Image (cartoon, rainbow, N blue to C red):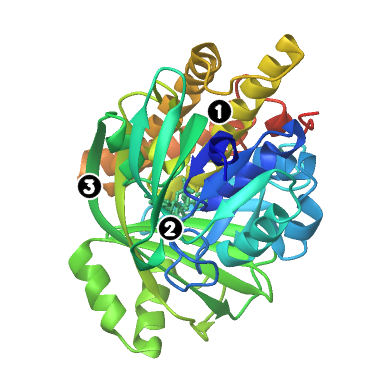
């Protein structure tokens, strides 16, 4: 093989939800792209395409539509037409409604494994896209004109690739981020998310619920077959305790905390836990390497925004690369400093804002102090009574605020 055959325009480290989405978003640009994913397809240990459910925002739905993938995703997704937000034991509650916001749905819930099927299958249709899986990025050498990427494969094999641009999409504990010398801060929320799904007596009917309780927030999302997916954030000791309970005892605990808005719970599925932390990279670019998704920012799932925010990274990076190609009217260097700086500049405000909003919600609703509780009940009232506040919040949650890249507006790249 000649050296040329090992060279790519873009190498994406991490073929999870975000890395795979980027590979597909770039498809119309006819670039040579490789995705390196550490965990084999179909392996139950795959950390991204697992049993969790993800609430896709309006802008994420539009983006998949513009990429020609929405029809396949829609088949197994559930529209959310209203969100009910409440604080257990207190009077404040609020309600966001799709009709009031002038949209058909506030978002759509899809099971990660199902989304993974659609995205991973679509990769095989993309010309010029190579999937190296299982393969782990184990070394990175940033040079002025290219990047050398060392890959570790099964049975102790290893090889090097070169590329113009290396994209780190390898998650919150990104090894690539560290290899290129970008530091990250991490705040442990000292909570675990206990997730799973169950059958409520009353079908959720496209309603999502966010309930703040003394032990932590509970999100209940409508999923297919009239089931509901739950994300229950708890202090680690309490999470361990409920994980050890029988299904019956677990449902009783969850029911006590959530209440009977959907009647009695039954048929709870397999439960799993996720540690919750806020992580933030100190910058998004180092030489010819750029960070996207959780490698750039890992959020608490309380506002269901992590993947949606990461998809806007994908849309912005694809947009910057597409623009550069239109301007040069020929082959482009995807790792050109101007492209990467434009991307970083564009993403800064949105990332900061979402970090502030989710972290603020966790802290405000995580406090048991009486003055804070009074304040947040007033806040919920204000949220409902002050004109425009609810709509503004809804626009942020739907991913429709600020200057959006083409794909997030539903406009195909080419
Ligand atoms: C309980 C819970 C519920 C959530 N719900 C929502 C929601 O409703 N809406 C929402 O928008 N977000 C939600 N999120 C956030 C969302 O899951 C993440 O933002 C999203 O998974 C990030 O995707 P990613 O591809 O950046 O990272 P990851 O999902 O971590 O994927 C990283 C990938 O990189 C691979 N990898 C790692 N290291 C290497 C390496 N060295 N070489 C090659 N490959 C490597 C991994 O195997 C993995 O496939 C939730 C998160 C949690 C924990």
**Which mark, residue 188?**
3
Q: Which residue is mark 2?
A: 38
Sequence order check, earlier mark of 3 and 1 = 3
As drawn, 331 above or below 182: above
Is 14 in front, or is 65?
14
The CA span between labels 3 and 1 is 30 Å
Residue under numbered circle 1: 389
Q: Residue at x 34, y 86 (%)?
A: 249
Say whether residue 7 is left or right of residue 124. left
Badge 2 element: loop
**Does the rendering let one see residue 217?**
yes
The percent coordinates of residue 265 (x first, y second) are 51, 81
Which x, y percent locates residue 269? 49, 81
Residue 34 location (% of width, % of height): 57, 44
Q: Using residue 183 as the reference point, say whether residue 351 is left or right of it.
A: right
Label 1 element class? helix
Does the Cβ of the disc 2 residue fall within 8 Å of ligand 1?
Answer: yes
Task: Specify few, some or many for label 2: CA neighbours under 10 Å numbering under 14, 14-19, or 20 or more.
Answer: many
Q: Does residue 198 appear left or right of residue 256 in this picture?
A: right
Write the residue at 65% across / 42% down: 60
Whether residue 96 is visible: no
* Residue found 78% across the figure and 46% down from its top: 104
């Amino acid at each position: 093989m000649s050296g040329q055959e090992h060279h790519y325009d873009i190498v994406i480290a991490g073929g999870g939800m975000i890395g795979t989405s980027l590979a597909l978003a770039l498809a119309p640009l006819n670039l040579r792209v490789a995705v390196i994913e550490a965990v084999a397809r179909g392996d139950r240990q795959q950390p991204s395409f697992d049993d969790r459910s993800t609430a896709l925002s309006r802008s994420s739905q539009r983006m998949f539509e513009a990429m020609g993938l929405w029809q396949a995703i829609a088949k197994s997704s559930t529209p959310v037409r209203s969100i009910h937000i409440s604080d257990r034991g207190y009077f404040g509650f609020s309600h966001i409604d799709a009709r009031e916001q002038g949209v058909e749905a506030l978002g759509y819930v899809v099971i990660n494994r199902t989304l993974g099927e659609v995205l991973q299958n679509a990769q095989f249709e993309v010309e010029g896209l190579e999937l190296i899986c299982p393969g782990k990025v184990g070394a990175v050498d940033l040079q002025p004109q290219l990047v050398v990427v060392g890959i570790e494969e099964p049975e102790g094999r290893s090889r090097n690739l070169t590329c113009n641009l290396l994209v780190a999409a390898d998650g919150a504990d990104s090894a690539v981020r560290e290899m290129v010398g970008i530091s990250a801060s991490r705040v442990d929320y000292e909570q675990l998310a206990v997730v799973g799904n169950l059958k409520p007596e009353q079908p959720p009917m496209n309603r999502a619920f966010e309930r703040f309780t003394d032990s932590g927030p509970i999100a209940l999302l409508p999923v297919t077959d009239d089931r509901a997916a739950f994300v229950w954030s708890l202090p680690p000791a309490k999470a361990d305790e409920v994980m050890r309970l029988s299904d019956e005892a677990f449902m009783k605990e969850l029911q006590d905390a959530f209440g009977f808005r959907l009647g009695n719970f039954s048929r709870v599925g397999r439960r799993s836990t996720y540690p919750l932390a806020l992580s933030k990279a100190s910058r998004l670019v180092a030489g010819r390497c750029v960070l996207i998704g959780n490698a750039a920012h890992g959020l608490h799932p309380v506002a269901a925004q992590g993947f949606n925010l990461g998809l806007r990274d994908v849309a912005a990076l694809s947009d910057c690369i597409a623009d550069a190609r239109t301007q040069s009217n020929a082959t482009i260097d995807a790792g050109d400093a101007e492209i990467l700086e434009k991307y970083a500049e564009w993403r800064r405000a949105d990332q900061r804002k979402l970090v502030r909003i989710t972290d603020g919600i966790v802290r405000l609703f995580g406090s048991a102090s009486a003055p804070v509780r009074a304040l947040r009940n007033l806040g919920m009232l204000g949220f409902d009574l002050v004109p425009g506040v609810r709509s503004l919040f809804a626009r942020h949650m739907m991913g429709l605020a600020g200057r959006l890249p083409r794909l997030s507006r539903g406009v195909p790249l080419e």
